[in-house]
């Protein structure tokens, strides 16, 4: 593991990136990884105009996206391991423009944009604002809407049959189907 690594405005390009401890904070600039980025320990926070790109992204810990974009640049997409948590405070989690998917076995919660098909046995919760799912959703994913009126879950793509969306206690919040 590394000590703190902070990226704010200068372009940084690597071939393989592995974080097994420490803290990665990116508040702006472009971080491009031409191979797989693996996060297996420590913590990551992306905010502002940050753009973190990798051919594939494997997440096995906690990540915060408070702005900016975390993006896969290939069909490989983003794999979120069991027990992993992505907290969205705005910003975008993008599985890529080449039909990439977000394979979610963990938890995604908050507000922002999820781009790319979503599948797996994970959980997605809209909380504290709008969480927009722009692509198709496969089977197995559990969806929830937080217990505040500002919690909005918006689907722009198609959903596999059999999905259930649960309104957390209080039965408030909004489900939008576009």
Image: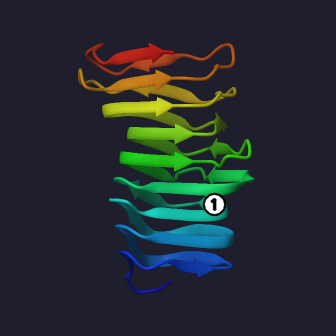
Question: Which image quadrant is residue 174 in?
Answer: top left
- Please determine whether, in this image, residue 15 is positioned above or below residue 138: below
- Taking depth in this image into account, of 59 and 29 the one nearest to the observer is 29
Residue at the image position 50 percent from the left and 61 percent from the top: 61
Tell me the crowding category of disc 1: few under 14, some 14 to 19, or many 20 or more residues within 10 angstroms, Cα based: many
Residue at the image position 41 percent from the left and 16 percent from the top: 175
Residue at the image position 69 percent from the left and 26 percent from the top: 139
Q: Give the labeled residue for mark 1.
A: 57
The chosen color scheme is rainbow
- Please determine whether, in this image, residue 36 is positioned above or below residue 142: below
Residue 45 spot, x, y in % from top left: 38, 63
In the image: residue 16, left or right of residue 43: right
Residue 161 spot, x, y in % from top left: 68, 13
- Please determine whether, in this image, residue 164 is positioned above or below residue 52: above
Helix or strand or loop: what does disc 1 sit on? strand
Residue 52 spot, x, y in % from top left: 51, 64
In the image: residue 48, left or right of residue 55: left
- Taking depth in this image into account, of 84 and 87 the one nearest to the observer is 87
In the image: residue 167, left or right of residue 79: left
Residue 131 spot, x, y in % from top left: 41, 33
For the image, the number of numbered tags is 1
């Amino acid at each position: 593991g590394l000590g703190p690594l902070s990226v704010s405005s200068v372009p940084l390009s690597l071939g393989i990136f592995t974080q097994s401890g420490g803290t990665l904070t990116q508040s702006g600039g472009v971080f491009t990884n031409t191979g797989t980025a693996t996060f297996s320990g420590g913590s990551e926070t992306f905010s502002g105009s940050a753009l973190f790109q990798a051919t594939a992204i494997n997440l096995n810990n906690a990540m915060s996206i408070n702005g900016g974009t975390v993006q896969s640049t290939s069909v490989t997409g983003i794999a979120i391991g069991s027990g992993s948590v992505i907290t969205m405070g705005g910003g975008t989690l993008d599985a890529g423009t080449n039909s990439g998917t977000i394979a979610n076995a963990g938890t995604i919660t908050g507000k922002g944009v999820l781009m790319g098909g979503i599948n797996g046995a994970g959980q997605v919760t809209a909380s504290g604002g709008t969480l927009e799912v722009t692509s198709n959703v496969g089977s197995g994913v559990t969806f929830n809407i937080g217990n505040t009126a500002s919690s909005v879950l918006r689907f722009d793509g198609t959903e596999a049959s059999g999905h259930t969306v649960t309104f957390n206690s209080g039965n408030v919040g909004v489900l939008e189907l576009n």
